[in-house]
Image (cartoon, rainbow, N blue to C red):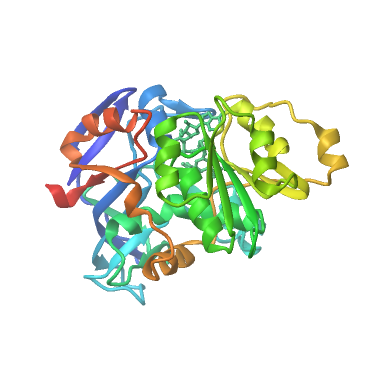
Amino acid sequence: MRTAVLVEPMEFELQDRGRPTLGPDEVLVAIRDVGICGSDVHYYEHGRIGDYVVEDPLVLGHESAGDVVEVGDDVTGLEAGDRVALEPGVPCRRCAHCKRGEYHLCESVEFMATPPHDGAFAEYVAWPADFAYKLPETVSTVEGALCEPLSVGIHAARRGDVGTGDTVLVTGAGPIGLMVAEAARAAGATDVIITDIVPEKLEFARARGVDRAINVAGTDLETAVDEYTDGVGADVVVEASGAEPSIRSTLDGVCRGGTVVLVGLSDEAEVPFDVLEVIDNEIDVHGSFRYANTYSAAIDLLADGVVDVEGMVDFRSSLENVDDAFGRAMEPTVIKGIISFDDD
Ligand SMILES: NC(=O)c1ccc[n+]([C@@H]2O[C@H](COP(=O)([O-])OP(=O)(O)OC[C@H]3O[C@@H](n4cnc5c(N)ncnc54)[C@H](O)[C@@H]3O)[C@@H](O)[C@H]2O)c1
Ligand SMILES: C[C@@H](O)[C@H](N)C(=O)O
């Protein structure tokens, strides 16, 4: 099977590998669409993300969907011909976190395209059937693949307890910020404000219907949010840029008694944060890491037309053109590229 393998930073090699063997609880999936995520680009450019280092050749891609072509002996509920979205993190299912339903916090989770675990830039993937979600007729495999970043957005909105009538400030209008905006709206937020420093990103977010898009390169965040909220501030701020100034500024945008959710991963582990302001204003600060129990919700939202993820796709590329695709994905105005096996 055709597989794109990252062999060195900035270098993919197309390899012909044997099809994976199928375990009794697994499905064999012919991959159709895989989203290119910022973390794939980071591994491509730098060969590492923090402590995760690409030491051996790695298959990237963790936002994937495709066709079931074979099911293991013990699989029920899925059959050949079903289209599925693959949830990329498979936990141990036995530890305290798994038992509590917080399986994304499982210390033994094996996450696609995170060293040493291969991802989905491959013609076939064998995957545990309970982490393969059947797509209804109306949901495309591109949408199925993008259930992954949408799940990051849904989990962040849940962590912020976003509810009906809330004003939500999302900092960073990349794919994750846009997914958070979609999820917040779906959770009942009536006002969504977004920030960025790239005018095209803000224009894109505006065209998708955010209520206010603020270029924080030239506008003071606190003043702009105060203007919009009559001096109250946002009920929930979700930080989705990972930029240090943006992380610090979350406290300028949140209302007293509000919630800050940190999703964006800063290059620095330590970022100065005004803890007195946190205490004085009773701000709840939550981390948000990946997601758990979100795929069914993501698929329902897509099937009902409540969220739009396909509109974020800038281009589709074949596996053979993976180097070009990553070059394009690195352009600052690009939101989402897809490696599509249908194009072959
Ligand atoms: N916690 C998690 O589970 C999780 C999951 C996926 C991604 N992430 C992280 O979320 C962040 C966003 O991911 P992405 O794929 O959208 O990244 P991205 O780089 O495509 O988007 C980030 C956006 O933030 C903007 N930005 C930069 N500086 C800014 C500033 N000072 N204020 C406002 N916006 C600013 C950029 O212009 C860009 O549009 C990254 O740090 C990523 O690593 C976290
Ligand atoms: C959650 C996922 O999208 C992220 N890129 C990660 O590797 O954790």
> Which residue is most to the bottom?
77
Quarter where residue 60 is shown: top left
State the image coordinates of residue 288 (x, y, percent, origin top left). 61, 47
| Closer to us: 338 or 123 | 338
Against 243, residue 193 (above or below) is below
Q: Residue at x 58, y 64 (%)?
A: 188
125 sits to left or right of 160: left
Q: In this rendered view, identify the residue nearer to me: 149 or 253.
A: 253
Image point 54% across, 29% down: which residue? 51
| Tag count | 0
Determine whether 335 is above or below 234 in the image: above
Q: Position of residue 7 (x, y in %)?
A: 29, 27
Q: Is residue 92 visible?
A: no
Residue 12, position as x, y percentages in the image: 25, 29
The residue drawn where x is 75% and y is 47% is 232
Left or right position of 71 against 201: left
- In the rendered image of this protein, does residue 302 appear above or below residue 114? below
Q: Residue furthest left?
A: 344
- Give residue 275's position: percent from left, percent from top: 82, 34
Question: In the figure, is residue 153 to the left or right of 25?
Answer: right
| Residue 307 can be seen in this image | yes
